[in-house]
Image: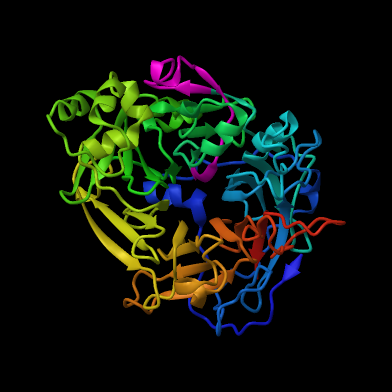
Amino acid sequence: MSTNKPITRRHFLAYLGTGAATLVTAASGLESLLGGSGTAKAASVLFDQETPVVTSGSLAGKPVSTDELTLPQGFRYDVIAAYGDIINAKGDTFGYDSASAVFLPENGSRVKGLLYVDHETSSPQWAHGSRSEGAYTAGQIHSCLYNQGASVLEVYRGMDGQWRMDPASPAARRITGLDPFELTGPARGAAAVHGAVQVQGTLGNRTGAVTLWGTVLTSEGSWDDTCHDAGLDPSHYGWAAEIDPADPSFKLRKHTALGRFRHSGAPMKLTRDGRAAVYMGDTAEESPLFKYISRGRFDEGRGTANSELLTEGTLYAADLENGRWIELSVDAVKEVLRSPGLDLPHAVKYTQEQLQALFREQADVLVHAAEAALLLGATPLGRQGDAALHPQDGSLYVSLVDTSVHGQILRIVEEEGDAGALAFDFEISATGGPQSGFTSPGHLAFDRSGRLWIAADVAPYRLLRSAYRRYGSNGLYVLDLKAPAGSGVTPFASAPVGAAFASPAFTPGEQTLFLSVQHPGEASGAGTPQVSSWQHPSGSSAPRSALVAVRG
């Protein structure tokens, strides 16, 4: 356990947020569908007594750039799991580059539940090792694939107040780049995925979002390097994959109806007529915002069988200039490509002739969703870090990491507040920079009062340099959307050197904040001094990504 440095505390916010699991139910108007099934031996010592609600503080004074997770006075953190830690009796280990965290409370408990954690990348420097004579060994490739994917942990708060994982739990397990996943939807078995109906593993897992029926949609955001090194088919990655943390027997699947691109964020809500709508960002530069609407309607009584809603529906992309959602259909794409001398969008890296050969059937539109969307007039946006639904009005907030140097927060308001609408308004809710006090918004989460938690995502090679120097290490900020422009941002935490925070998740009652600390020491490179040793294991100085619980 670690405690923060004594930084001046000041009241600003009343509560921490409820995070991803609560956000889904609040924004959709549903009662909680979540519940863990852990049977920790430590259950007899668990308690649910009142502890202080984690009130907020401010990292006052100069920007922080120490090799520590720095919190305001009165806060501390418990390391629940770090890279390489054993998580179950089988001997599985916690993956590398922990990313999005989702807490699934057991029957609404504040002190026990399942934690789903994404693992976005591996690392040749700190994980699977460097190439030998220009190539990786079979063992290194296996390690690289194993390090990615997700971990499921059963966690509990002990009588001493400290959070721990229970490695004896039957729910604790890994989902990796080695496990089989079924393809569902229109591209299953199609030529565009080379006839595949089952693919190997999940890669580049950046964000996780709870579905209306209590499973998790994980976003595959980056896969090129791993596919190249491991000899994997790139068309098998870049999908939204579904996992049920509470049920190891749930068949792992990737939903092709939701499109293939560099996924980031997948918040879900009901349309006015009961269909499932999923909003999805794209981390690539000059790519659009997507929305999927199921054909069928949600039935709470069907439980996880509602997963079928993600196999048949319509994929749209946002045209901000005209405030409309554009349906992505192969007929519409073909019609555009018939135009002689077509002026292709800058981000489409094909010739018109190549595109005519590429788009033959609807499966091709799904596999090349970003290209199809741009051809049809969708608005190219900057790199999208995450998406979150406001818990009170249901509007969509999207982080644009690099837009206008320091990033922006885009807000989408559907016509009549209906997620099934094909028209919307938008606004820029906040712009990063000196006038606002935050920079480079990446992962997002709302609290129950509607304040937006923003994890900065400045690239390690930019940290403490040029326009980013004034912000110190990557931080976690709280934005009060009701405050006057430029006055509503409070810095809450600062990451170790080279690290960034990912997707906050909160317990019911808002007394604990779960937070991933990604890639500490990433600023280090071959031939350069090591810049971090945060959470290094015994006998080593190598830094490790980790999942922590922040409490007052």
Give left or right: position of 102 versus 365. Answer: right
Q: Residue furthest right?
A: 539
Question: From the viewer's perspective, is residue 472 above or below residue 338?
Answer: below
Colour basis: rainbow
Q: Residue furthest left?
A: 340
Residue in the picture at 40% in, 77% down? 434
Question: From the viewer's perspective, is residue 415 above or below residue 493?
Answer: above
Q: Is residue 272 visible?
A: no
Quadrant in the rendering for residue 422: top left
Quadrant in the rendering for residue 158: bottom right
Question: From the viewer's perspective, is residue 278 above or below residue 531?
Answer: above
The magenta segment? 182-209
In this orientation, which residue lies closer to the viewer: 15 or 411?
411
Give left or right: position of 358 versus 120. Answer: left
Give left or right: position of 303 versus 124. Answer: left
Residue 203 painted magenta: yes
In this orientation, which residue lies closer to the viewer: 298 or 183?
183
| Number of numbered discs on residues | 0
Q: Is residue 221 visible?
A: yes
Residue 63 painted magenta: no
Q: Residue furthest front?
A: 133
Where does the image place residue 13, in percent across and percent down from the top left? 48, 74
Give left or right: position of 104 versus 259. Answer: right
In this orientation, which residue lies closer to the viewer: 381 or 438?
381
